[in-house]
Amino acid sequence: MRRFRFSIFVPLLAAWSIVGEPETPTHVDGAPPSKIAVVGAGIGGSATAHFLRQHFGPEVQVDVYEKGEVGGRLATVTVNHNDYESGGSIIHSLNLHMQEFVKQLGLKYRRNVAGKTAVFNGEEMILEETDWYLLDLFRLWWRYGISFIRLQMWVEEIMEKFMRIYKYQAHGYAFSSVEELLDSLGGSGFINMTKRPLSDSLLELGVSQRFIDEVIAPIMRVNYGQNVSIPAFVGAVSLAGAQNNLWAVEGGNKMVCSGLLKMANANLLQAQVNSISPVPSDTVHTSNSHMTNSTMAKTKELSKDTINKIVDLHQTGKTEYVIGDALEYQLNFTTATGTGSELYNIVVLATPLQASIGSELQFQGFTTPFDQLPGSYHSTVATIVHGYLNTSFFGFPDPRLFPFASVLTTDTPSLFFNSVASVCPVNISAGFRRKQPQEAGVYKVFSPQTLDKPELKTLFKSYYSVQVTEWQAYPHYGSNQRLPPVELHPNLYYLNGIEWAGSAMEMSSVAAKNIALLAYHRWNRQMEMVDQKDLMHRIKTEL
């Protein structure tokens, strides 16, 4: 849930110039959709509503369905009259969509409060950050050789390629699958990285096993709650988020979600969507014919076979039918007061569909590209404790001599937690200072299971309050998983498949922009803007 700052082994990445405002394609073929639905109001869903409004204009009705709280996995808890991040808490300086959101919404960057980090192996601190950057570099070189330099170069190369997405999206290009998107950025290399364990890729680079065990594994544990067998691309996303050029939003990161919904003028409906079914509209357009109910059976008489035939033509590329004219979708939902249904031209699902996360959404009247989405989500427990840290457990009997704000852990069976960190409230006053270990402070503990009382007593001398949030935080990653589809049916899109390539706020924002562009181009038959090859060359020629 957290992109963890770990500056002692990777210097700042080079800054990337921010691309200009997105260019809305000028070619518009046919009437715009009248109603669009987005299911889910986390960062992915709220960003999707924002981008849909940008591309489809002010007349389209955008409804956002959310069964829980706006923000999803961006959330806060209140401790002693202050709010603290319990979900996604860190944003990278190269996350250009998130930066632009904050700028457009008039939000502020949260003031950074410095703190040092250490790595604990269950017996002792094996790596400690100091106040001296050159000393930290010397210690890394002494213990790990040039592993950290090789790692830095690898991460920089991946980040440089990934940053191409902002140029592609600024020029209006979209991708019909996660694979197509990754291929456009890094070719087959990026796709192969979603299928190969991180540890194998790093060993091949010449990174030492010791460095992997003592530096890489702790970062994977705090960021994804998993080990170094996760796919290399996921690991690269995690390592890119382990820089010291990180930030957060004053007042809480979830404010971005509520702000985007307001800016998009979206209608927020507190409801759970139970089922989605296609409903043929009165008119079907194809490149070869224009059939209305005067030349064809009425809407209600269009059969499921007809719907599937339209879809088959679309998928095989044998027709350029206007998808938006062919089908609408009926969403059946439940609210606090009863049930209801609405019709939409376009639907975007911005919520996980895996059964393991409790998704009960049913698809009726058509066949999706999957019987059941593979994989499951990984459970991570965030425990917010107001109390006194037991520094003796880490080898510091005198808490006044304990200099660390954050402690990561190695993959040691006896350790029952992934990390513990002194955390700051989402609103930081000018005179705020981080509590010293001898004082009662607020700490966030990440663990695979809920901490029991003996475990809490191991980590804390005493405590005033404990608040537990169990997140189905990220996919449970494996190296043999398939990436979920983006297009489930004509004009029905799935955003959260991007998480299986890498889970982060910016990844969801990139997926949101891609789906908004894809939906726009599909609706207006602008196929030349979808899945184009050699985009860097194409963009240079356009310029």
Image: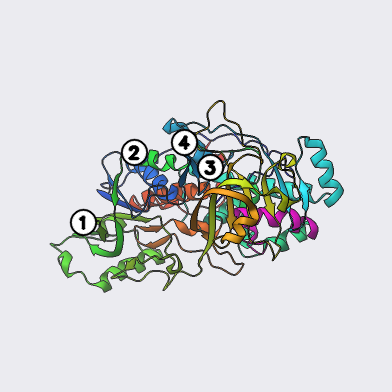
Q: Main secondary structure of the magenta part?
A: helix
Say if 3 sits above or below 250 in the image.
below
Q: Secondary structure at mark 3?
A: helix
Residue type at tag 1 = Thr
| Mark 3 or mark 4, earlier in chain | 3
For this orientation, the residue located farthest to the right is: 142
Q: Give coordinates of residue 182: x percent, y percent.
A: 56, 55
Q: Secondary structure at mark 1?
A: loop
Identify the disc placed on residue 337: 1
Identify the disc placed on residue 166: 3
Whole-number angstrom distance, CA of label 3 to CA of label 1: 43 Å
In this view, the residue in front, 443 or 343, is 443
| Mark 2 or mark 4, earlier in chain | 4
Q: Could you tell whether 147 is left or right of 178 in the image?
A: right
Q: Which residue is mark 4?
A: 251
Give the residues drawn in magenta, as a range: 207-236
